[in-house]
Structure formats: C-alpha cells, structure tokens
Image (cartoon, grey):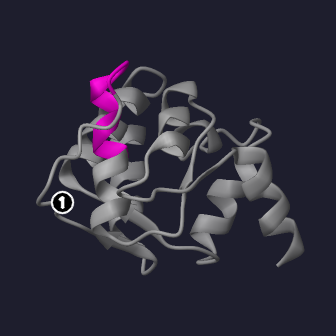
C-alpha cells in the first residue's frame, strides 16, 4: 500500500503521511526497495524516484530486514513473495494490502501472516 499512498490525491495518502510522522514502522528489504523503485519510476521522474527512496530508507521508523528464507506462499504471483518473506523475517504484525493474491495467506497455517486491507489500516490510523 506504500506505493498507492504516495500521491497526495490518493485516498490512501494518509498512510504515507502517517509513515512520515512515525506512527508505524515500515519493514524494507533490498528486494522490496528495488520493486518500489521500479514502480515509482513508472509514474514519476528519476529525481522524484531517488528523493522518495532516500527519504524512505532514512526514516527512523524504517527497518531494513534481510529475509533468510523464501516461503514461496504466493503461487499465482511469485513476485509478491518478497512482500511475504519480509514481514515473516521482521516479525511484522500484518501486511497492509488489497492485492487478491495475498488471500492465500488466510489459508496458510505456517507461517502465520496476517493481512489487512488498506481501508482497515486507515481506520486504525484514524483511531490513534
């Protein structure tokens, strides 16, 4: 959900604002940052891409994790597995996603990876 929260015109912009204000911790890995770079570059110029990435990795509430195991839980979109391996390795509370491929995690008994939709996360942020 990080990527769709970047635009100030997105209904998910409060997620990025909450990240910048340190209201939650974001876990990052080299693979995830590289993916962010590719996706952001599709929408913004190179200077903006580099500025966003520098900002992201410099945040006090950004934690760099090196996953040592690849769970391969998402078969329908194997590229999404990096977004599962990271929170497992970093012991995250949940993954915020609206991606349908992550629904398989509700049927996985181990490792337990909780997912919540962006709308739920926005509600949580509004309560805090």
Question: Residue 43, percent across and down?
Answer: 48, 23
Number of marks present in the image shown:
1
Q: Quadrant of residue 79?
A: top left
Question: Residue 13, percent across and down?
Answer: 72, 48
The quarter of the image holding the N terminus is top right
Q: Quadrant of residue 48?
A: top left
Query: Which residue: 28% across, 52% down?
Result: 85
Is residue 82 rendered to the left or right of residue 116? left
Magenta segment, principal secondary structure?
helix
Q: Name the residue under label 1.
A: 67
The verdict on residue 80 being magenta is: yes
Range drawn in magenta: 75-83
Q: Residue furthest left?
A: 68
Question: Residue 33, percent across and down?
Answer: 29, 47
The verdict on residue 87 being magenta is: no
Given residues 83 and 43, the one toward you in this image is 83
């Amino acid at each position: 959900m990080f990527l769709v929260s970047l635009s100030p015109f997105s209904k998910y912009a409060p997620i990025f604002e909450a990240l910048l204000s340190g209201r939650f911790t974001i876990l990052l890995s080299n693979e995830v940052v590289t993916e962010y770079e590719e996706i952001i570059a599709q929408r913004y110029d190179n200077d903006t891409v580099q500025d966003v990435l520098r900002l992201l990795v410099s945040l006090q509430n950004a934690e760099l994790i090196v996953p040592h195991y690849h769970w391969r839980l998402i078969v329908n979109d194997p590229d999404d597995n990096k977004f599962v391996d990271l929170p497992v390795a970093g012991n995250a509370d949940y993954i915020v996603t609206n991606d349908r491929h992550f629904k398989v995690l509700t049927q996985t008994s181990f490792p337990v990876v909780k997912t919540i939709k962006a709308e739920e996360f926005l509600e949580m942020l509004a309560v805090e």
